[in-house]
Amino acid sequence: MAYLPLMPQRFASGMRFGWRRFDQSAGPLGRLGTLEVRLARSGEEVKQAQRLRYRVFYEEMSAVANVRAMFSGRDRDPYDRICDHLLVLDNSGVGEPEIVGTYRLLRQAVAEKRKGFYSAGEFELAPLLARHPDRVFLELGRSCVLKPYRTKRTVELLWHGIWSYVRQHNIDVMIGCASLEGTDSRRLAPQLGLLRRAAPTPDAWRVRALPGRGVAIDQLADPDINEMAALRELPPLIKGYLRLGAYICEDAVIDWQFGTTDVFIVLPVERINPRYINYYGEDASRHAA
């Protein structure tokens, strides 16, 4: 199987953000019009992504900022130092391109050497990893797009970048938290119930919430829900996971800081709908730069 050569293995000397090094020569993973997708090349670009996250999570949505976040205008945590940061940039303006979308990527090999996976703060991941010792996992998180750019083109380019990254690093399984806005699980019961009905998790891929953290979705589900109405209320990101073939695990966890209710997503690569693999290309060549 051919793989797209996305990231040369030479690193710019002296460029560090914490312990993380950046490859300033890494080219785009894909382009679509004036937009391009690539990994962050510097700590400054990560800071720009953090400012974008702050605008979306704290100023537009319901996240509660601590003093540090308010002072800096950035959404940040220690995981930023060990993750790769996927960026969508708009090159239509004068001067430096604007970062308009981002996704945070954490490979299993990095997580095991450092802080573990971010989502382990809400869900019990150890049993899942133990059941699949020969699989390579990738955690997706902190996804957001600037409001004017929440279009099919931007989301398509983000997924192209993720697929390129998955192929480059021989990833077998994508995991992570996906969020519904709001902390009232009973109000969100129609959407949560729809997710479980549409993508129930087989035993091999089950993940439970940490003790005392979870709400069992099946206990909230109403068999008489209006599925079309519930589907319209789902965030585009979660709809995308469903179309790709992801499983939705059975517990929801309330994240009080971000004002969301989180579900756990498991997406084995072999489960990805062939339609999307054919669309992006087995070797992620559709929007290749």
Image (spheres, rainbow, N blue to C red):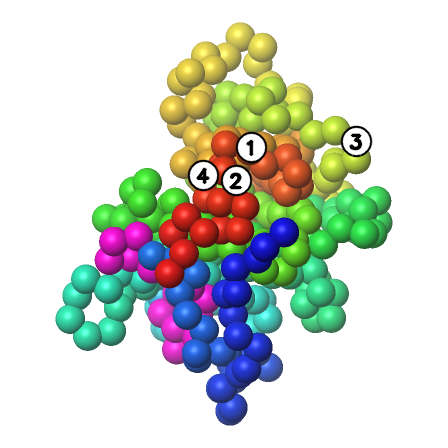
Q: Residues within 10 Å of mark 4 (few under 14, many from 20)?
A: few
Between the residue at mark 3 and the residue at mark 1, the CA separation in whole angstroms equals 21 Å
Label 4 to label 3, Cα distance in Å?
A: 30 Å
Q: On the image, numbered disc 3 is attached to which residue? A: 203
Of the image marks 1 and 4, the number of the one nearer the N terminus: 1
Tag in front: 2 or 3 = 2
Label 4 vs label 3, nearer the camera? 4
Residue 19 lies, in percent from the top left, at 59, 81
Q: Nearer the viewer, mark 1 or mark 4?
A: 4
Magenta stretch bounds = 32-49
Callout 1: helix, strand or loop?
loop
Amino acid bearing label 4: Tyr
Q: Is residue 271 visible?
A: yes
Q: Answer left or right for 105 relative to 137.
A: left
Q: Amino acid at mark 1?
A: Asn
The residue to which callout 2 is attached is: 277
Q: Label 1, on which residue?
A: 273
Of residue 263 and residue 216, the one placed in the foreground of this image is 263
* Image-based side of 37 in relation to 133, left or right: left
Instruction: Give the SS element for disc 2.
Output: helix
Q: On screen, 204 above or below 33?
A: above
Residue position for label 4: 279
How many angstroms separate mark 1 from mark 4 (CA)? 10 Å
Is 87 positioned to the left or the right of 122 in the image?
Answer: left
Q: Earlier in the sequence, mark 4 or mark 3?
A: 3
Q: Are marks 2 and 1 in contact (CB under 8 Å)?
A: yes
Does residue 53 appear anywhere in the picture? no
Any magenta on residue 136? no
Q: Residue at x 66, y 56 (%)?
A: 170
The amino acid beneath tag 3 is Asp
Q: Quadrant of the C terminus?
A: bottom left
Vertical side of 192 occupied by 41: above or below: below
